[in-house]
Amino acid sequence: MTDLTRLTAAEIAARIASGAVTAVEVTEAHLARIEAVDEKVHAFLHVDREGALAQARAVDAKRERGEKLGPLAGVPLALKDIFTTKGIPTTVGSKILEGWIPPYDATVTQRLRDADVIVLGKTNMDEFAMGSSTENSAFGHTGNPWDLTRVPGGSGGGSSASLASFQAPLAIGTDTGGSIRQPAAVTGTVGVKPTYGGVSRYGMVAFSSSLDQGGPCARTVLDAALLHEVIAGHDPMDSTSIDEPVPAVAEAARNGSVRGMRIGVVKEFAGEGYQAGVMQRFNESVELLRELGAEIEEISCPSFDKALAAYYLIAPSECSSNLARFDAMRYGLRVGDDGTKSAEDVTALTRAEGFGAEVKRRIMLGTYALSSGYYDAYYGSAQKVRTLIKRDFEKAFERVDVLISPTTPTTAFPIGERADDPMAMYLADLCTIPTNLAGNAAMSLPCGLAPEDGLPVGLQIIAPAMADDRLYKVGAAVEAALIDKWGHPLIEEAPSL
């Protein structure tokens, strides 16, 4: 039998629907793969073996009754541990929620269950989604399957690593400043940040509410599109949810073409600090798009140079507010409650022990930026820069249909290399942050291997808000051309574990 863990999600769904294989067989194959390799990779924080098999049996029973199955029925998925899951732990990679079992499902979790997608378990992540390497998890780092001594990106490194190590064909991530796209780039997978408000945030533990966005992760553009359609759509439980039809992303992925499209190359995303091999593969992708019939134009977005500074004021400010709820009084960890200490003392002791260094750093930075006398100078100024970035995007999209850039300035860096240098770590998100500040849609897909280290390089595609289908149209065209050029998907070159 074909190794079920090597099939795409679309192929798995088709085989289950036809009866060629059962959902239980598919699920057992992926659980066996997790058992075989995850001790090395550490992509998962919790594997729900019994729950996954129960879901799979339910899918098989539906098929036997002749009921119509959805496009991804029976397909296994790895869920980032930031979404609440009824009955199984949700930790957000933090000791402060270690062992917490939510009483309800996030909207994304519920939509996956309703679509008969099999949730294998919860994936490792930087604590509260704060990081670019998954080294900030309270439960240990995750390795990059291409080279286990290197990072898989962050904050969603567990989700991207589960895909690259063939432990799951689909995954869910969240993207606050690039935490879906940057891990996708350094693991040779596909990651999409939908338009802000396109996927519900209800039940997604908040980091920075005006920036956070859940989205699909996969090994192919079509698989990502199919998952996108499952989780997207209006949700009355989320006040920021967009009440408009979901763009036809799966259709765009099936009919990808760039002929006649106007594609802008972002001038600011190049130069000093960019790895030579990353720029080589990116420039080759630009020429490939030209060969496929696209019109290429250089676009300058001058405010993008200020995006990193603005982001690291806005995101910490919002996190300092959102994380105030972790006070040891309502749920999660409680330290020092021996009857002799005040509630304030218990809260302080709990936060000191429960929050990691990066979370504390951002809370302090955000609290300072919002404090009396500094609000206008810091947070207020950052919001003005955010407006300038939005205007740069608006002007750019008057001239072109999509923008492209490298997803990250470098390939995956060694574990520990940037652990003591926050600024170097933050630069990993240099190309991805402007999209979050503006609320646009963006995708990363693999565009080759850097010649100097043999590691994956990501191509970033950015589209206007609610034009997510353009991402898939361009992404599918690039993916097909690269497969035609190399004869097989890039991800299959990943070293065997």
Image (spheres, rainbow, N blue to C red):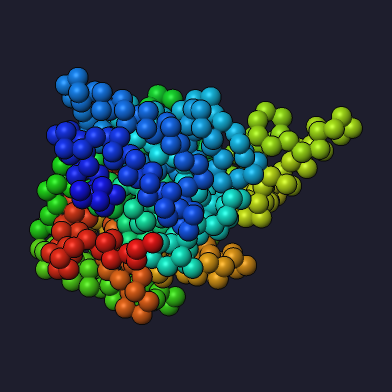
Q: What is the x, y in percent for residue 5?
A: 29, 49
- Across and down, in percent, residue 135 comes to 55, 58
Front-lying residue, 382 or 156: 156
Furthest-right residue in view? 340
Q: Is residue 317 above or below residue 346?
A: below
- Residue at the spot 11% in from the left edge and 68% down from the top edge: 291
The image position of residue 199, as x and y in percent, is 36, 36
Residue at 32 percent across and 31 percent down: it is 56
Can residue 375 be seen here? The reply is no
Q: Is residue 114 left or right of residue 363?
A: left
Q: How many marks?
A: 0
Furthest-top residue in view?
Answer: 65
As drawn, 452 above or below 39:
below
Work out which quarter of the rendered image holds the C terminus and state it. bottom left
User: For this view, does 245 lie left or right of residue 36?
Assistant: left
Residue at 20% x, 50% y: name it. 2
Q: Position of residue 184 (x, y in %)?
A: 36, 57
Q: Give 85 or 369, whichever is nearer the viewer.
A: 85
Q: Is residue 189 visible?
A: yes
The residue drawn where x is 12% and y is 54% is 257
